[in-house]
Amino acid sequence: MSSKVLPLLILTFSGVAAAQQQQTTQPPPAQVQAAKQEALKLSDAFVSVAEKVSPAVVQIDVTTRDDNEAALSRMLGIGDANSPIHRGMGSGVLFTADGAILTNNHVIDEALSINVRLKDGRYLPAKLVGRDPSTDLAVVKVDATGLPSAKLADSDAARVGEWVVAIGSPFGLGYTVTTGVLSAKGRGGIGANAIEDYLQTDASINPGNSGGPLCNLDGNVVGINSMIVGRGSGIGFAIPSNIAKRVGEQILKTGRVQRAWIGVGYQDLTPELATLMKVPAGSGALVNSISDNSPAQKAAMKAGDIVAAVAGKPIKSGHDLIREILQHDVGQTIQLEIVRDGKHYGTNVVLTARPEPVVPPVPAQQANLPQSGMGLAVRDLAPQQAAQMGLPSKAVAVVTTVTPGSAADRAGIKSGDIVAEADGVADPNSAQIQQQAADGTLLLRMRRGDGAFYAVVRR
């Protein structure tokens, strides 16, 4: 036998052996069917969450002013230099049946107008009730009743490794459902907000998901999606539902948030510090400063104290200390377990309100006045101008200004749109449009670029 043929024969024999081995190791049909059934159960669980929660999820559209474009408009003397020309988008979740919506503060920050699109297709103006930059949360409200609302779960009971489902509008793609696991709890030190106690997930979260819910397989909200670490990294963060619930309820009740405070600076006990202080590492939070006239000072606490427990709950780090304090209400008395010079003491502390910077109103709150009219200004194009734009040679009406938050803005009309039809009148001029608007409602067919669309504008 030629030596040149031998390798081929060996490969052939090896392939036969491998095929025979593969045939003998295939799982039996019953096992395959059982695996399929388990996969279908998980799939059905995801479907159930999507069907249960999606009706309570909303898309939030905001308009903001682009100062650079406004400055250019003023310099060139074109358009309305104060008009909003930038539109943003985020998500939110209804948590009351009368229209209260939880979302992120960064979604509505600097908003000139806020509008909400519901799952049933309604597009409603929203009022900002209040916001809390320290946790990146905000509450907006629409004027409606009987709405589907999501249930907020106990985020403390969520388990690392359990399945979670995120629902929102990434890149404007409404009601997108993604799945993953709860990767970690109690994430802090990121530097995004003053108070950080994030849930981490690998469920796909992208721009536009902000403010949407992160749900468990029971269809209850465990977190409000807030941010990602690097686009495409697969790491997202959500604000725990326990924090969101406390913040949302306070904003609805008083328009602002009060948080419990004891007035200490703190740091973690490193192994080196723990050794010198003769305590186990991770056995508490080390107090490094005491604020004047604070609850801690009144309770005779000192720098160098180690807070080992709050209201009976063991403390392992500074993050634990803040989390446990924030679980209590202002005015409540709680007991702290203190380690000082190796000895354990108990002291009672009366919680006061955490000093918070004043939260300035966003433009939408400053301009939150009843809108008169439809918020739509039009002017007639001269026949020559219309012809240059490829429009009918007779006078044509073009939209020059849309007031933020107005009926025209909510209908999706933009500056530069052409009015092709108003209440059945084709190619109307501005006078005819004004006449048709006298009854408070306009059915418009608009031209924008090469496309057209219908819009209802109601005063």
Image (tube, helix red, strand yellow):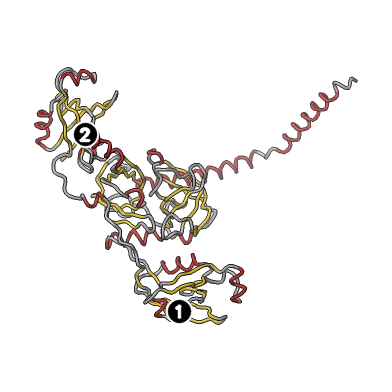
List the single residue furthest toward the right: 1
Q: Position of residue 19 (x, y in %)?
A: 74, 31
In this view, the residue in front, 313 or 273, is 273
Q: Is residue 37 left or right of residue 425?
A: right
Q: Is residue 2 left or right of residue 147?
A: right
- Considering only vertical position in the picture, is 24 above or below 57? above
Disc number for residue 77: 2
Amino acid residing under circle 1? Met
Label 2, residues with CA under 10 Å away: few <14, some 14-19, many ≥20 = few
- Considering only vertical position in the picture, is 108 above or below 11? below
Instruction: Name the residue rendered at 59%, 72% in the picture.
Output: 274
Instruction: Name the residue rendered at 60%, 40% in the picture.
Output: 33
Dot 1: element: loop
Q: Is residue 294 left or right of residue 190?
A: left
Question: Rounded to the nearest whole Å, what is the CA distance between mark 1 and mark 2?
Answer: 64 Å
Amino acid residing under circle 2? Gly
In this view, the residue in front, 253 or 53, is 253
If the image is split into quadrants, where does the C terminus sit? Answer: top left
List the single residue furthest toward the front: 75
Q: Position of residue 415 (x, y in %)?
A: 23, 33
Closer to the eye: label 1 or 2: 2
If the image is split into quadrants, where does the N terminus sit? Answer: top right
Instruction: Name the residue rendered at 38%, 55% in the picture.
Output: 136
Q: Position of residue 369 (x, y in %)?
A: 17, 50
- Considering only vertical position in the picture, is 28 above or below 325? above
Dot 2: element: loop
Which residue carries the number 1 mark?
301
